[in-house]
Amino acid sequence: MNLVGNWSYPTTMKFGAGRIAELPDACAVAGMKKPLLVTDKGLADLPITLSTLDIMDAAGLGRALFADVDPNPNEKNLDAGVAAFKAGDHDGVIAFGGGSGLDLGKMVAFMSAQSRPVWDFEDVDDWWTRANSDDIAPIVAVPTTAGTGSEVGRASVITNSETHVKRIIFHPKVLPSVVICDPELTVGMPKFITAGTGLDAFAHCVEAYSSPHYHPMSQGIALEGMRLVKEYLPRAYDNPNDIEARAHMMSAATMGATAFQKGLGAIHALSHPVGAVYNTHHGTTNAVFMPAVLEFNAPVIADRFDAVAGYLGIAGGFDGFKAYVNDLNDRLGIPKSLSEMGIETDRIAEMAEMAIHDPSCGGNPVKLTVENLSQLYRDAL
């Protein structure tokens, strides 16, 4: 199969192995002549980053790099990134990496045009209309993992370093102008990152499919995204050089993030506080919560996941799907409980209060309260 494509949904996308070579063309389309490449600390010195800087340099775009980005990026990283953007007189951002690099890069482009604090643009009601929309810098996104799908998102997750609360910052113009999805960039991912990011994509699809909101397009994308994860995540985990599996997982990640326009739910509402307080890997944390949340939502979603199980070739309907999720977690070395990740009971009440204010709560098919969120934390422990 020729896994190469030029897509225009949900934005301009260049998909296929080796297409990072087209980065200069993508920058030209976006209107950039002097971009700042934003990535995270772990990627800064890796070959994929250095070779991308070489591509930029050879095309006359310079090789400006900002990499002071934490695994759960915060407003301090953002302030430093905006300062670097302005000091270098840059005219656009190449957001490069996994969720942290992509999210922070998009926010650097966004906040370079703003005078108000970033928290004024949280995804609440129409707060995005407070922004100066005219001078937001263009963004080209280059994912190097297959999980968050932030390359096709109109928002970023930023952690408040004082309150340890994750906030979703939204603006329509944060959607990158051009995305380069090159599966060769994901070949070097360690097994635990392959697993965690892949299961993040799976969680996006599961929660979008579970959401009660009406969005048939997202429903169909979520269903096929789940199939791709089922077929290809174990292959990518077992053989990191399987470029076909890597390509399909990169598609699944993009699909998951496109699908969750329909909504997320309790998995993400529970996971965000854990990541903010304990600095855990987001996708891995999602995977730990998934079995408990599926059981919690069962009265509402069991019938629709009977159909999912049939499409995925899983026997036993919803119960079979739940068993499959547990087996997949085990297969990929995911911790069986939060306690295995170092989470303790003494902060459940605090995290439940944080979770109930997470925007993801609105997409859960069963109404969430502080009480049932607390119980879900206990169940996952």
Image: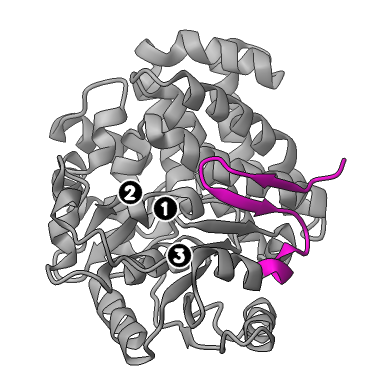
Rendering coords of residue 364 (x, y %): 31, 27
Comparing 210 with 219, the one in front is 219
User: Of the residues shown, which amino acid type is indicated by label 2?
Assistant: Pro
Read off the residue under disc 2: 172
Quadrant containing the N terminus is top right
Marks 2/3: CA–CA distance: 12 Å
Rendering coords of residue 131 (x, y %): 18, 58
Which of the 4 image quarters holds residue 290? top left
Q: Is residue 308 left or right of residue 300?
A: right
The correct choice, above or below, for 251 with respect to 310 in the image is: below
User: Of the residues shown, which amino acid type is indicated by label 1?
Assistant: Leu
Give the residue furthest to the right: 1
N-terminal of the two: label 3 or label 1?
3
Residue ID at (29%, 34%): 376
Read off the residue under disc 3: 139
Read off the residue under disc 1: 175
Comparing 368 with 136, the one in front is 136
Comparing 144 with 95, the one in front is 95
N-terminal of the two: label 2 or label 3?
3
Quadrant containing the C terminus is top left
Label 2 packing within 10 angstroms: few (<14), some (14-19), many (20+): few
Which of the 4 image quarters holds residue 280? bottom left
Q: Secondary structure at mark 3?
A: strand
Q: Which residues are magenta?
A: 1-22
User: Of the residues shown, which amino acid type is indicated by label 3?
Assistant: Ile
